[in-house]
Image (cartoon, helix red, strand yellow):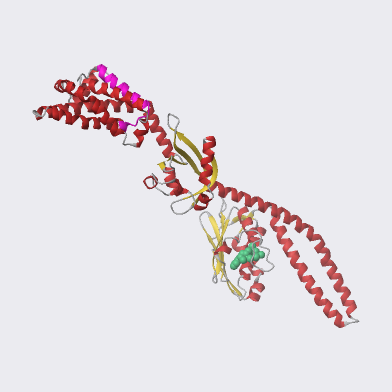
Amino acid sequence: MASSEREHRLRFLGLTERDEQLLREFRPVLEQHVTAVEDAFYAHLLNFPETAQLLSDHTTVERLKKLQRDYLLRLFEGKFDDAYFQDRLRIGKTHERVGLSPRWYLMAYNLYFKLITPLIRDHCIATPGHAHETIVALEKAFMLDASLAMDAYIASDRYRHLQQLESIINDSADVIFSLDNDGRFRSWNRAAEKVFGWRAEEVLGKPLKLLVPPDRLHAGELAQIESEIHRVGHCHLETVRVAKDGRIVPVEVSVTLLRDPQGNPIGRSAILRDITSRQRLEEEKLRAERLAVIGTMSAKLAHEIRNPLSSITLNIDLVRDEIETLSQASPAAGTESRALLQSLDTEVRRIQRVTEDYLKFARLPKPMPDRVQLNEILDQGLSFLDSLFTATNVTVAKELDPALPVLLADEGQLWQAILNLVRNAIEAMPRGGTLTVLTTSQPQHICLTIRDTGKGMTEQERTQVFTPFFSTKVGGTGLGLPLTQQIINEHGGQIRCESTPGQGTTFVIELPLRHGQTS
Ligand code: ADP
Ligand code: MG
C-alpha cells in the first residue's frame, strides 16, 4: 500500500498521533495482563463448535496465544507505519489461506475490545476522561486492522473463486446440497428449491430423511449409500425422492464424502438430477417399440390366416350347394344343416373382418395427397350411410363451414379415418341419437368435430382409446381409433377426444393448412 493511501486510511478513521500516544502509554499495563487476556480470548472461542474443532490441539493453541500476545503488544506500540500495514495485510492473507471465515476474524476484534476496555477503565479510574480517550483510540486501531483484514480477503483470488463457485452452484440446473456428519442439511441451492419445493431456510438443519420416501427408508437405502461411501468415498444411483407436496421425483444421485483440509470427514455433498422427462421419453420409446413388434407380428399372422379363410369361405359355398341338392330328399335335415352353415359363415366373416382391420393398420400406405374439399367428402360419404343411419335411429346434424379452404390430403385415407369415428358413434348409440358433424376453419388449420349423444366413456377408457387393441366391445378389434390417429398424424394433424359418461363423446381433428393451400 502506497504511503499516501496509508495516510488516507488513517485520516479516514481519524487515527491521530494523540491516539498513538495514548495506546503507547497503556502498553506497560497491557503487558502485565496480556496472558490473562489471551486465556480469556481462547476460552471464549472454545464455546463454538466450529472454532473448538480447529483448536482441539493444545500446542496449536499455545502457539496461537503467543502470536496473538505479540500482536496486541505491537498494536499498543502505537506505530501504524508502513511495516505495520504490510504485516496486517500479510496476516489477513494467511488467515484467508487457511480458510478461516472472515466472520471469526472480525469477531476477534470485538472480543478483544470487550476484554481490554475494563482494564483501561480500572487503570484510569481516577481520570475517566483519559480512559475514554484511550478506549476510543483502541477502537480506531481495531477498525484499522479490521479494514486491512477485509482488504486482504476481498482482494484474494480465493475469495473471488469462492464467489464464482457459489454462483455456479446456485445457478446449476441440478439439485446440489451438502450435509453435515449427522446427515443434516448445511446448504441447499436454487434448483433444490425448484425441484423439491422446500425453501433453504425450511430445510437447513433438518435431517436428510425429509427427502426420502418411507419405503426407501425402510428398505435401508441410506445405509447402503453410507456403506458405499465408506468403501470408495462416493456413490451413484438412480432412485426416487419426495417433494414438499408429496410428489415423487425420479432422480439420478451422486453423493461424495466431504473432508476438511486435514482430511477429516465433515459431511456429504450430493448432486441430484431430476430425470422425470428422460424417463417419460424412455417409456414412450419402449411402448412404440413394443407396438411395432406387435404390429409386424399381427400383420404376418393376419396374412397367414387370410388364405385358409378364403378357401373355407369357398368351401362353405360348395357345401351350401351340396345341401340344397341333398335336402330335396330330406327337407327337415336340410333346414338344420342350413342353420349350422349360416352360423359358420357368420363367424368366418367376422374373422375375415378382423384380419382385414389388422392388415389395414399394419400396412397403412403413405398418404397420396391431392387437393380435396373436406365438406364434399363428408357430404358424399355420409349420404352413402343414409340407410344405416335410418336403421339405427341416428339423426345426422351437419354444420359445414361454407368457406372451408381446400386441403392437401389422401381422400381415401381421410374418409377411412372419419368412417371409423362415425361407426364408433353409431355403436355408442344403440337406441339411436344425434350425430353432429362440424367443420370450421382457423388461420392455420381446418377443424373437424364429430359428436355423438351416446353412452360416453369413463376417464380411464378415454385415455386408452388410441391404444391398439383397446376395445370394450364384444368382437371389437380395438384398431379403429389407432388407425384413425395414424392417418391424421401422417397428414400432420392431431386428434383428441372428450367424453362424459352417459352424455356422449366428441372427437376433434385438426388438419394443418400448409403454405399456398387456401382456395
Ligand atoms: P373398436 O371399435 O373395435 O372397439 P376402436 O379403436 O374403434 O375399437 O375404439 C376403441 C374403444 O374406444 C371402443 O371399444 C370404445 O370403448 C371406445 N370408443 C370409441 N369411440 C367411442 C364413442 N364414440 N363413444 C364411446 N366409446 C367409444
Ligand atoms: Mg371402432
Image quadrant where one finds the C terminus: bottom right
Give above or below for 461 relative to 263.
Answer: below
Q: Is residue 23 visible?
A: no
Q: For residue 98: magenta?
A: yes
Q: Is residue 306 visible?
A: yes
Q: How many marks?
A: 0
Residue that appears at 37% across and 27% down = 98
User: What is the x, y in percent for residue 297?
Assistant: 73, 54
Give above or below for 415 relative to 50.
Answer: below
Q: Is residue 24 left or right of residue 312?
A: left
Decide whether the magenta segment is chiefly helix, strand or loop: helix
Between 441 and 275, the residue placed more toward the observer is 275
Q: For residue 83: magenta?
A: yes
Instruction: Name the residue at the left extreme.
Output: 126
Q: Is residue 55 left or right of residue 35?
A: right
Between 462 and 282, the residue placed more toward the observer is 282
Q: Is residue 418 left or right of residue 500?
A: right
User: What is the x, y in percent for residue 8?
Assistant: 21, 22
Residue that appears at 32% across and 34% down = 46
User: What is the x, y in percent for residue 512?
Assistant: 56, 54
Between 427 and 418, the residue placed more toward the observer is 427
Residue that appears at 37% across and 28% down = 57
Give above or below for 408 relative to 505.
Answer: above
Give above or below for 334 relative to 250.
Answer: below
Q: Quadrant of ligand 1?
A: bottom right
Q: Which segment is the magenta one?
A: 82-104
- Kindly indicate the quadrant of the structure image that contains residue 408: bottom right
Image quadrant where one finds the N terminus: top left
User: What is the x, y in percent for residue 14?
Assistant: 17, 26
- Kindly indicate the quadrant of the structure image that contains residue 425: bottom right
